[in-house]
Image (tube, rainbow, N blue to C red):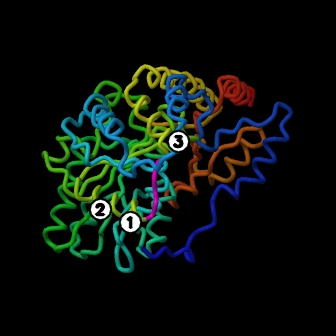
Amino acid sequence: MGLSTGSLPDFPWDTLVPFAQRARAHPGGIVDLSVGTPVDPTPVLVREALAAAADSPGYPTTHGTPALRQAVVAWFARSRGVPGLDPAAVLPTVGSKELVALLPSLLGLGAGDVVLHPATAYPTYDVGARLAGATPEPCDDVEARLADGSGDVRLVWLNSPGNPDGRVLGADRLAAIVDAARAAARRDGRPVVVVGDECYAELPWDEPWVREGVPSVLDPRVTGGDLTGLLAVYSLSKRSNLAGYRAAFVAGDPALVSRLLETRKHAGMIVPGPVQAAMTVALGDDEHVGEQRARYGRRRRLLRSAFEGAGFAVDGSHAGLYLWVRPEGGYQDCWETVADLAGLGILVAPGSFYGAAAAGHVRVALTASDERVGEAAARLSGA
């Protein structure tokens, strides 16, 4: 694979530095809600599993231990409505961001190939296409784009729940996209891979997703029992506070996973053995996931109430780790909102990081301590 870095955008978070400095100058210090990095403790049982596996002198397996892959299979069946997944079709990854960034290259995409991603989206989908020399294209009407006859789309990224906007795609919509991709592949004689980035799936807030669960692209209602051309990406960073472990996996079409496995063997892209052991334990325990979701739920309720009381609207945000916020009463550029909030010592991410369509919103992360979230709420109430 040939990685092309010449056309990469500047790293967006670097542009937040002056606003962070302004927020730090607040007498009560900064409340940093700009990045979704966990702040709560890693569960004790996961740390114990990591420590127990610390004597790890040999190379770990790229494919993941059988115990880890079976834990993923059991988790999909128990928590995601996806029974009977083949353990061979599971592959651990070094966090999910590296897979998002490298997947177009690992699949052999290049010049003339189009990678679709949501119009409001995590910027790494765009970056991954550029690294491969392919063309990123923001698109929310995926079915129409696949049906236009151009035959250039090779990869479709879905992100549900969405980062930054918390949008959830129902099973019917996911099935329609999968059907459109398969129809395009048959028509053009070229595969179209559909990948669901589902890293926030265990953080639903609104109905019907709390009751029904957030559907996976691997759900039988979506696939019709056929996983061909489909992959799901998941990370343990948020649900288990394992961002520092770089613990994630991809699963789905056995042929695609096998292809990724072979490339990753050659490249030495391996999740460390102790981390694999910790992942196995984390995936087998639902209690700590519920406890962490309850923490985020409390912070979400407090922040949402405070923002709405201060004259902001919260759009979408049906699931996930963020509030998607804009001022009430008319459009304001996201950077003005960032500046206004920095004056209160609150740092948020501008919507423009996530595409031109998002320039009127800011993203507010729930990943601050209870004390700092309370401080942010008090400042918003005072304002």
Identify the mark nearer the N-term, 2 or 3: 2
Q: Residue furthest bottom?
A: 111
Q: Nearer the viewer, residue 315 or 121?
A: 121
The answer to which quarter of the image holds residue 105 is bottom left
Front residue (pair 256, 340): 256
The span picked out in magenta is: 267-271
From the image, tell me which residue sits under label 1: 106
* Amino acid type at image mark 3: Trp
- Crowding at mark 3 (Cα within 10 Å: few <14, some 14-19, many 20+): many
Whether pointer 1 and pointer 2 mark residues with C-beta atoms closer than 8 Å, the reply is yes
Number of numbered markers: 3
Q: Position of residue 324 (x, y in %)?
A: 53, 41
Disc assigned to residue 360: none
Residue at the disc numbered 2: 259
Question: Viewer-nearest of labels 3 and 1?
Answer: 1
The residue carrying mark 3 is 324
**Residue 349 percent coordinates (x, y):** 62, 48
User: For mark 1, does the 10 Å Cα neighbourhood hold few (<14), some (14 to 19), or many (20 or more) residues?
Assistant: some
Q: Position of residue 182 (x, y in %)?
A: 17, 61
**Front-lying residue, 217 or 304:** 217
The amino acid at mark 2 is Arg
Q: Is residue 270 magenta?
A: yes
- Which is more N-terminal, label 2 or label 1? 1
